[in-house]
Image (cartoon, rainbow, N blue to C red):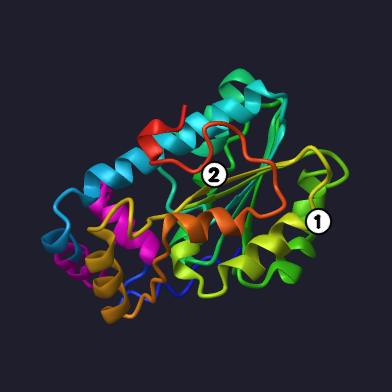
Amino acid sequence: MPDEPDLQTDRPHSARVYNYIVGGTENFAADRETAAKALEGWPGLRTSMLANRACMRRMARHFTSLGIRQFLDIGAGIPASPNLHEVVQETAPDARIVYVDNDPIVLAHARALLTSTPEGRTAYIQADMRSPDELFGDPALHETLDLARPVALTVIAMLQFVEDAQSLVDALVAPLASGSYVALTVPTGDLAPESRDLAREYTRSGIPMYLRDRTEVERLLTGLDLLAPGVVPMPRWH
Protein backbone atom coordinates (compact mmCIF):
# COMPACT_ATOMS: atom_id res chain seq x y z
CA MET A 1 0.00 0.00 0.00
CA PRO A 2 1.33 3.48 -0.77
CA ASP A 3 2.21 5.47 2.33
CA GLU A 4 0.63 8.72 1.11
CA PRO A 5 -2.38 8.09 -1.16
CA ASP A 6 -3.95 11.04 -2.97
CA LEU A 7 -6.98 11.77 -0.78
CA GLN A 8 -8.60 14.09 -3.35
CA THR A 9 -9.79 16.38 -0.58
CA ASP A 10 -11.04 19.04 -2.99
CA ARG A 11 -14.01 16.94 -4.10
CA PRO A 12 -16.72 15.13 -2.11
CA HIS A 13 -16.72 11.36 -1.93
CA SER A 14 -19.75 9.29 -0.94
CA ALA A 15 -17.85 7.36 1.76
CA ARG A 16 -16.63 10.55 3.41
CA VAL A 17 -20.04 12.26 3.18
CA TYR A 18 -21.49 9.17 4.87
CA ASN A 19 -18.75 9.29 7.49
CA TYR A 20 -19.54 12.91 8.37
CA ILE A 21 -23.29 12.40 8.58
CA VAL A 22 -22.99 9.47 11.00
CA GLY A 23 -20.59 11.40 13.22
CA GLY A 24 -17.17 10.41 11.91
CA THR A 25 -14.10 12.60 11.63
CA GLU A 26 -12.49 11.29 8.41
CA ASN A 27 -13.92 13.91 6.05
CA PHE A 28 -13.10 17.27 4.50
CA ALA A 29 -14.77 20.59 3.69
CA ALA A 30 -16.15 19.40 0.34
CA ASP A 31 -17.69 16.36 2.03
CA ARG A 32 -19.21 18.44 4.84
CA GLU A 33 -20.70 20.94 2.39
CA THR A 34 -22.41 18.18 0.43
CA ALA A 35 -23.59 16.55 3.66
CA ALA A 36 -25.07 19.79 4.99
CA LYS A 37 -27.08 20.36 1.83
CA ALA A 38 -28.24 16.76 1.80
CA LEU A 39 -29.42 17.05 5.41
CA GLU A 40 -31.35 20.21 4.57
CA GLY A 41 -33.43 18.21 2.11
CA TRP A 42 -33.68 15.10 4.32
CA PRO A 43 -33.25 15.83 8.04
CA GLY A 44 -33.76 12.12 8.81
CA LEU A 45 -30.85 11.05 6.61
CA ARG A 46 -28.58 10.32 9.57
CA THR A 47 -31.21 8.02 11.09
CA SER A 48 -31.54 6.23 7.74
CA MET A 49 -27.77 5.78 7.46
CA LEU A 50 -27.55 4.38 10.99
CA ALA A 51 -30.41 2.00 10.14
CA ASN A 52 -28.41 0.91 7.11
CA ARG A 53 -25.42 0.15 9.32
CA ALA A 54 -27.58 -1.81 11.76
CA CYS A 55 -29.08 -3.78 8.86
CA MET A 56 -25.59 -4.70 7.67
CA ARG A 57 -24.80 -6.12 11.10
CA ARG A 58 -28.00 -8.20 11.12
CA MET A 59 -27.25 -9.51 7.65
CA ALA A 60 -23.73 -10.48 8.68
CA ARG A 61 -24.96 -12.36 11.75
CA HIS A 62 -27.68 -14.07 9.72
CA PHE A 63 -25.25 -15.35 7.11
CA THR A 64 -22.95 -16.56 9.86
CA SER A 65 -25.87 -18.46 11.40
CA LEU A 66 -26.40 -20.11 8.00
CA GLY A 67 -22.85 -21.45 8.10
CA ILE A 68 -21.16 -18.91 5.83
CA ARG A 69 -17.52 -18.34 6.71
CA GLN A 70 -16.39 -16.26 3.71
CA PHE A 71 -17.45 -12.67 3.04
CA LEU A 72 -16.74 -10.28 0.17
CA ASP A 73 -17.70 -6.70 1.10
CA ILE A 74 -17.98 -4.33 -1.85
CA GLY A 75 -17.70 -0.68 -0.88
CA ALA A 76 -16.26 -1.18 2.59
CA GLY A 77 -16.26 2.52 3.47
CA ILE A 78 -14.21 4.25 6.13
CA PRO A 79 -13.65 1.82 9.03
CA ALA A 80 -16.19 2.23 11.83
CA SER A 81 -16.32 -0.34 14.62
CA PRO A 82 -17.96 -2.77 14.68
CA ASN A 83 -16.81 -3.46 11.14
CA LEU A 84 -18.16 -6.43 9.21
CA HIS A 85 -15.33 -8.76 10.22
CA GLU A 86 -15.77 -7.88 13.89
CA VAL A 87 -19.47 -8.76 13.73
CA VAL A 88 -18.84 -12.01 11.87
CA GLN A 89 -15.81 -13.20 13.81
CA GLU A 90 -17.54 -12.59 17.13
CA THR A 91 -19.49 -15.81 16.51
CA ALA A 92 -17.33 -17.37 13.78
CA PRO A 93 -13.67 -16.69 14.66
CA ASP A 94 -12.50 -18.67 11.62
CA ALA A 95 -14.35 -16.45 9.12
CA ARG A 96 -12.48 -14.81 6.26
CA ILE A 97 -13.38 -11.38 4.93
CA VAL A 98 -12.20 -9.38 1.92
CA TYR A 99 -12.99 -5.68 1.84
CA VAL A 100 -13.07 -3.69 -1.41
CA ASP A 101 -13.17 0.08 -1.87
CA ASN A 102 -11.79 2.72 -4.24
CA ASP A 103 -11.69 5.70 -1.84
CA PRO A 104 -8.06 6.63 -1.09
CA ILE A 105 -8.94 7.63 2.47
CA VAL A 106 -10.27 4.10 3.08
CA LEU A 107 -6.91 2.83 1.87
CA ALA A 108 -5.19 5.14 4.33
CA HIS A 109 -7.14 3.57 7.19
CA ALA A 110 -7.28 0.02 5.86
CA ARG A 111 -5.21 -1.35 8.73
CA ALA A 112 -8.34 -1.02 10.87
CA LEU A 113 -9.96 -3.56 8.57
CA LEU A 114 -7.14 -6.07 9.01
CA THR A 115 -7.50 -6.82 12.73
CA SER A 116 -8.59 -10.40 12.26
CA THR A 117 -8.87 -13.09 14.89
CA PRO A 118 -5.95 -15.55 14.83
CA GLU A 119 -8.27 -18.25 13.44
CA GLY A 120 -9.65 -16.11 10.62
CA ARG A 121 -8.28 -13.68 8.09
CA THR A 122 -9.10 -10.30 6.55
CA ALA A 123 -7.76 -8.55 3.45
CA TYR A 124 -8.28 -5.19 1.77
CA ILE A 125 -8.30 -4.58 -1.98
CA GLN A 126 -8.10 -1.08 -3.45
CA ALA A 127 -10.32 -1.45 -6.52
CA ASP A 128 -13.34 -0.03 -8.29
CA MET A 129 -16.38 -2.28 -8.04
CA ARG A 130 -17.26 -1.28 -11.60
CA SER A 131 -14.24 -3.29 -12.77
CA PRO A 132 -15.18 -6.76 -11.49
CA ASP A 133 -12.67 -8.57 -13.73
CA GLU A 134 -9.84 -6.64 -12.08
CA LEU A 135 -11.33 -7.24 -8.65
CA PHE A 136 -11.71 -10.99 -9.09
CA GLY A 137 -8.24 -11.19 -10.60
CA ASP A 138 -6.57 -9.70 -7.53
CA PRO A 139 -4.24 -12.22 -5.85
CA ALA A 140 -5.27 -11.00 -2.38
CA LEU A 141 -8.83 -12.16 -2.98
CA HIS A 142 -7.74 -15.67 -3.91
CA GLU A 143 -5.25 -15.83 -1.05
CA THR A 144 -8.07 -15.10 1.40
CA LEU A 145 -11.21 -16.64 -0.10
CA ASP A 146 -11.86 -19.97 -1.78
CA LEU A 147 -14.35 -19.15 -4.53
CA ALA A 148 -15.12 -22.84 -4.95
CA ARG A 149 -16.95 -22.58 -1.60
CA PRO A 150 -19.96 -20.40 -0.70
CA VAL A 151 -19.36 -16.69 -0.13
CA ALA A 152 -21.60 -13.95 1.24
CA LEU A 153 -21.37 -10.96 -1.09
CA THR A 154 -22.40 -7.72 0.64
CA VAL A 155 -23.05 -4.56 -1.40
CA ILE A 156 -24.23 -2.10 1.24
CA ALA A 157 -25.50 1.32 0.10
CA MET A 158 -23.45 1.24 -3.10
CA LEU A 159 -25.61 0.41 -6.12
CA GLN A 160 -27.20 3.87 -6.18
CA PHE A 161 -23.84 5.12 -7.46
CA VAL A 162 -23.85 2.75 -10.46
CA GLU A 163 -25.80 3.52 -13.62
CA ASP A 164 -25.87 -0.05 -14.96
CA ALA A 165 -26.44 -1.82 -11.66
CA GLN A 166 -27.88 -4.94 -13.32
CA SER A 167 -24.71 -5.71 -15.26
CA LEU A 168 -22.62 -5.09 -12.16
CA VAL A 169 -24.68 -7.39 -9.93
CA ASP A 170 -24.56 -10.10 -12.60
CA ALA A 171 -20.77 -9.77 -12.89
CA LEU A 172 -20.24 -9.87 -9.12
CA VAL A 173 -22.48 -12.90 -8.64
CA ALA A 174 -21.21 -14.95 -11.60
CA PRO A 175 -17.89 -16.12 -10.02
CA LEU A 176 -19.53 -17.21 -6.76
CA ALA A 177 -20.09 -20.86 -5.90
CA SER A 178 -23.51 -22.43 -5.54
CA GLY A 179 -24.83 -21.83 -2.03
CA SER A 180 -23.50 -18.28 -1.90
CA TYR A 181 -25.60 -15.32 -0.72
CA VAL A 182 -25.99 -11.69 -1.81
CA ALA A 183 -27.01 -8.84 0.50
CA LEU A 184 -27.96 -5.43 -0.90
CA THR A 185 -29.10 -2.17 0.63
CA VAL A 186 -30.05 0.72 -1.62
CA PRO A 187 -32.29 3.80 -1.33
CA THR A 188 -35.52 3.69 -3.31
CA GLY A 189 -37.65 6.61 -4.41
CA ASP A 190 -40.96 4.94 -3.60
CA LEU A 191 -40.07 3.58 -0.15
CA ALA A 192 -38.09 6.70 0.83
CA PRO A 193 -39.37 9.68 -1.20
CA GLU A 194 -36.84 11.95 0.54
CA SER A 195 -34.09 10.13 -1.33
CA ARG A 196 -35.12 11.93 -4.52
CA ASP A 197 -33.82 15.21 -3.09
CA LEU A 198 -30.75 13.36 -1.84
CA ALA A 199 -30.03 12.00 -5.32
CA ARG A 200 -30.32 15.46 -6.85
CA GLU A 201 -27.96 16.99 -4.27
CA TYR A 202 -25.35 14.23 -4.58
CA THR A 203 -25.45 14.44 -8.38
CA ARG A 204 -25.18 18.25 -8.31
CA SER A 205 -22.13 17.90 -6.04
CA GLY A 206 -20.37 15.60 -8.49
CA ILE A 207 -21.42 12.23 -7.03
CA PRO A 208 -23.86 10.80 -9.60
CA MET A 209 -26.70 8.94 -7.88
CA TYR A 210 -29.15 6.76 -9.77
CA LEU A 211 -32.34 6.27 -7.81
CA ARG A 212 -34.46 3.18 -8.38
CA ASP A 213 -37.84 1.99 -7.16
CA ARG A 214 -38.61 -1.25 -5.36
CA THR A 215 -39.56 -3.09 -8.56
CA GLU A 216 -36.23 -2.18 -10.15
CA VAL A 217 -34.35 -3.39 -7.08
CA GLU A 218 -36.23 -6.69 -7.16
CA ARG A 219 -35.31 -7.00 -10.84
CA LEU A 220 -31.62 -6.79 -9.91
CA LEU A 221 -32.07 -10.11 -8.12
CA THR A 222 -33.69 -11.94 -11.03
CA GLY A 223 -32.65 -15.58 -11.07
CA LEU A 224 -31.76 -15.63 -7.38
CA ASP A 225 -33.84 -17.16 -4.59
CA LEU A 226 -34.92 -14.42 -2.19
CA LEU A 227 -34.63 -15.08 1.51
CA ALA A 228 -37.62 -14.02 3.61
CA PRO A 229 -38.77 -11.33 4.04
CA GLY A 230 -37.52 -10.32 0.59
CA VAL A 231 -37.07 -6.71 -0.51
CA VAL A 232 -38.29 -4.63 2.43
CA PRO A 233 -37.39 -1.40 4.27
CA MET A 234 -34.18 -1.91 6.24
CA PRO A 235 -35.74 -1.87 9.76
CA ARG A 236 -38.05 -4.71 8.70
CA TRP A 237 -35.25 -7.07 7.59
CA HIS A 238 -34.97 -9.56 10.44
Residue 39 as seen in the image, left or right of residue 48: left
Q: Is residue 26 visible?
A: no
Residue in front for this viewpoint, 175 or 4:
175
| Start-end of magenta stretch | 14-37
Q: Residue at x 47, y 38 (%)?
A: 56
- Image location of residue 52, percent across then percent down: 38, 43
Left or right: 227 as drawn, with respect to 70:
left
Q: Residue at x 33, y 74 (%)?
A: 9
Instruction: Residue under label 2, please give it.
Output: 113
CA–CA distance between discs 2 and 1?
24 Å
The residue lying toward the viewer, choosing from 219 and 138, is 219
* 63 and 11: which is toward the camera: 63
Eyeballing the image, is 162 above or below 184?
below
Q: Percent from the top left, x then y, of residue 143?
A: 81, 49
Give the main secondary structure, helix, strand or loop, of the magenta stretch: helix
Q: Is residue 48 above or below residue 196?
A: above
Q: Give the farthest residue toward the right.
A: 148
Task: State the SS at label 1.
Answer: loop
Q: Which residue does the image show at 53% across and 39% down from the upper left?
A: 230
Residue 126 horizontal side relative to residue 196, left or right: right
Residue 105 horizontal/vertical position (percent): 43, 63
How many discs appear?
2
The dot on residue 175 is 1
- Residue 131 point in image, percent of width and height: 67, 72
Q: Place residue 189 in its image quadrant.
A: bottom left
